[in-house]
Image (cartoon, grey):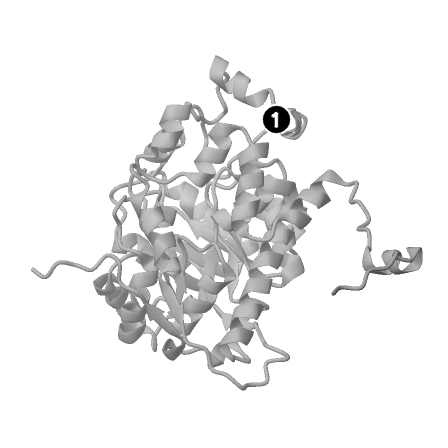
Amino acid sequence: MVQRQVPKPAEILELMQFKRPQLNGRRRRLEAALTIEDLRLIAKRRTPRAAFDYTDGAAEGELSLARARQAFQDVEFHPSVLRDVANVDTSTTVSGGPSALPFGIAPTGFTRLMQTEGETAGAGAAAAAGIPFCLSTLGTTSIETVKEVNPAGRNWFQLYVMKQREISYALVERAAKAGFDTLFFTVDTPVAGARLRDKRNGFSIPPQLGLRTIANAVPRPWWWYDFLTTPKLEFASLSATGGTVGELLDAAMDPTISYEDLRIIREMWPGKLAVKGVQTVEDAKKLAGLGVDGIVLSNHGGRQLDRAPIPFHLLPRVVREVGADVEITVDTGIMNGADIVACIALGARFTLIGRAYLYGLMAGGRPGVDRAIQILTEQIVRTMKLLGAHSLQELTPAHVTQLARLAPISR
């Protein structure tokens, strides 16, 4: 028989601790976000559909992106037990310099259209976290401004080869002069992929206002206030705008890009050179033989060739073939710190986050990017501790099994 009594007020106060309300709306939203997917949902609520879909979407049926994310979910970890993991070291060395974490911020185009702080938020957050920030050729913040925001940190530049070669060459020279230490020579964009969400939304640069656009903007006045009361978008590499992103890319990019362009840029660039957009073992071997410093396994976030190879699946084979000769970085599909741990365990030196950072940006500007980095960091540390790994160097292929979902049919 349970004995009951009248509770004493002092005992009630001990048992019931009331949480102090968070009056700052942005801080409250970001504190409630526990995963990158949580940030994505906040971003979707707060960003006009066209801008959100530009970030969230991929090419055609969006199969490449879905498969890349699924590949990370199809991972089985194998922990080692009875190991002292009170402290773990997440630092690494990549491209000749340090990084406090095994990931950096990937290059993204038209970033200030997503949220007005754009690349300055990304570069500032990267500086605070001690990780590299990569600026896109199609960024909406200048090379020099990024350097001002992140003067002592690691700044990288992603290069597209333009039809007007002098534009690309000038960007290389500016990045070198500003002290950027690594160049990503991007090879997967001879033409633009078919980004159907953009076409359906009528998304263009600059934004075109139609009835549907205006109706979608009404519940999001803060986005338009930020967009209209800050300096207009400027692109370091585009002399003219007016059209969908695909149309702008097709007008600017050169489908004749070749190994000769790589040779010329290699001679121009004084720092480390990585080739971004590698999608076959054969190309990885050829590039390693040419002496590049790094290879980025990437299908451009699924935004170019739909049904392209999954970078995470390519990783073990590329590591076996060229891992001793070049540093291998992976992007596309990363939404959790455990995804990053799996990449490092299978031999990647580094990873890049694109959408994960942009969801944070759209959810809350610079604090949202800080929160995205914090979420991924906590997930990395927790996963390493549960695996029994004190450092990134202790992660090995024995910690990871890639489960087969899409098995090739033998020829």
Q: Amino acid at mark 1?
A: Arg
Please, what secondary structure does the residue beneath circle 1 have?
A: loop
State the image coordinates of residue 277 (x, y, percent, origin top left).
Answer: 33, 54
Task: Classify residue 78 by image quadrant.
Answer: bottom left
Question: Residue visible at 41% across and 23% down?
Answer: 202
For this rendering, which residue is in front, 175 or 228?
228
Position of the C terminus by quadrant: bottom left
Q: Residue furthest front?
A: 1
Task: Name the residue furthest left.
Answer: 411
- The percent coordinates of residue 64 (x first, y second) are 31, 48
Residue 22 picture quarter: top right
Per the image, the residue denoted by label 1 is: 220
**Mark 1, residues whose alpha carbon is within 10 Å: few (<14), some, or many (≥20)?**
some
Quarter-of-image position of residue 29: top right
Q: Is residue 289 visible?
A: yes
Count of all numbered marks drawn on residues in the image: 1
Q: Left or right? Give the position of 99 relative to 286.
A: right
Residue 243 at least partly seen: no
Q: Is residue 116 left or right of residue 194?
A: right
The residue at the point 50 percent across, 24 percent down is 207
Vertical position of residue 321 compared to residue 280: above or below? below
The residue shown at (45%, 34%) is 53
Residue 331, compared with residue 56, is above or below; it is below
- Residue 298 is situated, as x and y percent measured from the top left of the image, at 35, 55
Name the quadrant of the N terminus.
bottom right
Q: Position of residue 101 (x, y in %)?
A: 56, 66
